[in-house]
Image (cartoon, rainbow, N blue to C red):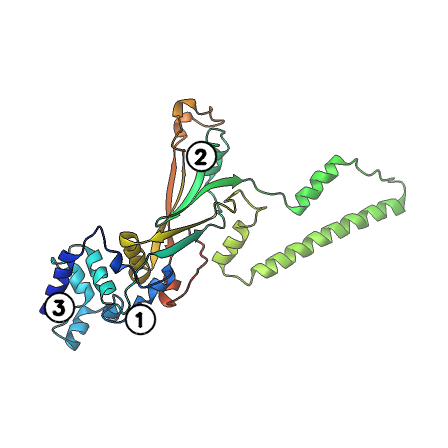
């Protein structure tokens, strides 16, 4: 990159008003299209970083600096200015914000402490929330493990009087044994089919399949109204999302359980089987993989399992 172009970029830094930079929004109608910057015109951020070896790039053009070199330069202390450069040089600048939607299908394999605190009775009005960028799904609720079909059957049988078998009658004993044998065969056949189906998946996929079964463990769900949240990303938030897709290929996802704004610690119910001092907000983070958006420009939706 020539020295003349560098001076122009520095001048762009000075001229851009951080309070009104809607003209540098990503060229996209949805957040997935932001990943199209790898094919955009001009020197988009991914185009200038095709070769990750700066020395090899400079051998092709000794007067051109890679973006990775600019990123380290003292003239570019804020990495966002480098990203702004790529946005400003695109063909067809975006003129409006980008819509980003988050949908939470469930939270599984919960830590024991979460379940214990939830069942203490002291945080019934605390909802779980999931957040990516500025999108936030609220009011998640803990669901207790559901009974298996066998457990349901056993529970129903306990309500009924046990059948009386005349042990002195060989035919009656044989009929009861046959009935129990068929029940066991059906159970074994169902288990066989389940594990045969499970073999089709990788070990990590098997783990997910089992943990996401509602009759295996407690889990967190969101109502139809709360499980989807759509927001408009613009300015700094839009630039950060573009960087997450094109550069990092991942983004932080937050899972929290915090008290409402009007919560009064002194008025909370006394927790069951827990020390009151252990009743504290839960803050946790994970990493959501955005590689699919990066590899498939224009992709509009991905479904992820995020550890």
The residue mark sitting in front, 2 or 1, is 1
| 170 sits left or right of 131 in the view | right
Between 152 and 232, the one nearer to me in the picture: 232
Q: Is residue 130 above or below residue 95?
A: above
Q: Mark 2 or mark 1, which has the lower sequence index?
A: 1
Locate residue 1, reporting x and y percent: 14, 70
Q: Residue shown at 50%/53% (left/top)?
A: 208
Q: Quadrant of residue 292?
A: bottom left
Residue 39 image label:
1
> Within 10 Å of the Cα at label 2, are there few (<14), some (14-19), or many (20+) other Cα atoms?
some
Q: Mark 1 or mark 3, which has the lower sequence index?
A: 3
Q: Quadrant of residue 282?
A: top left
Secondary structure, mark 3, is helix
Q: Which residue is mark 2?
A: 126
Q: Quadrant of residue 82?
A: bottom left
Q: Which residue is mark 3?
A: 5
Between 27 and 65, the one nearer to me in the picture: 27
| 50 sits left or right of 142 in the view | left
| 273 sits left or right of 262 in the view | right
């Amino acid at each position: 990159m020539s020295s003349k172009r560098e001076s122009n970029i520095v001048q762009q830094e000075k001229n851009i008003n951080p309070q009104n930079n809607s003209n540098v929004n990503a060229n996209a109608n949805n957040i997935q299209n932001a990943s199209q910057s790898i094919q955009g015109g001009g020197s988009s951020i991914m185009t200038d970083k095709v070769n990750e070896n700066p020395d090899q790039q400079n051998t092709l053009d000794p007067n051109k600096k890679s973006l990775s070199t600019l990123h380290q330069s003292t003239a570019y202390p804020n990495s966002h200015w480098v990203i702004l450069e790529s946005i400003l040089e695109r063909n067809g600048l975006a003129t409006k914000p980008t819509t980003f939607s988050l949908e939470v299908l469930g939270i599984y394999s919960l830590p024991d402490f979460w379940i214990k605190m939830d069942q203490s009775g002291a945080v019934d009005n605390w909802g779980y929330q999931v957040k990516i960028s500025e999108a936030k799904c609220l009011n998640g609720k803990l669901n207790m493990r559901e009974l298996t079909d066998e457990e349901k059957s056993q529970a129903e049988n306990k309500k009924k009087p046990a059948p009386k078998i005349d042990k002195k009658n060989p035919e009656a004993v044989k009929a009861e044994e046959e009935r129990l044998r068929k029940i066991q065969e059906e159970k074994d056949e169902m288990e066989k089919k389940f594990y045969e189906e499970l073999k089709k998946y990788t070990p990590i996929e098997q783990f997910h399949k089992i943990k996401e079964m509602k009759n295996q463990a407690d889990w967190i769900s969101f109502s139809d109204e709360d499980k989807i949240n759509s927001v408009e990303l613009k300015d700094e938030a839009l630039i950060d999302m573009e960087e997450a897709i094109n550069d990092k290929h991942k983004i932080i996802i937050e899972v929290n359980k915090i008290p409402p704004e009007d919560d009064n610690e002194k008025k909370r119910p006394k927790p069951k089987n827990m020390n009151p001092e252990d009743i504290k907000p839960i803050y946790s983070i994970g990493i959501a993989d955005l590689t699919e958006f990066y590899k498939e420009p224009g992709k509009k939706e991905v479904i992820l399992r995020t550890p």
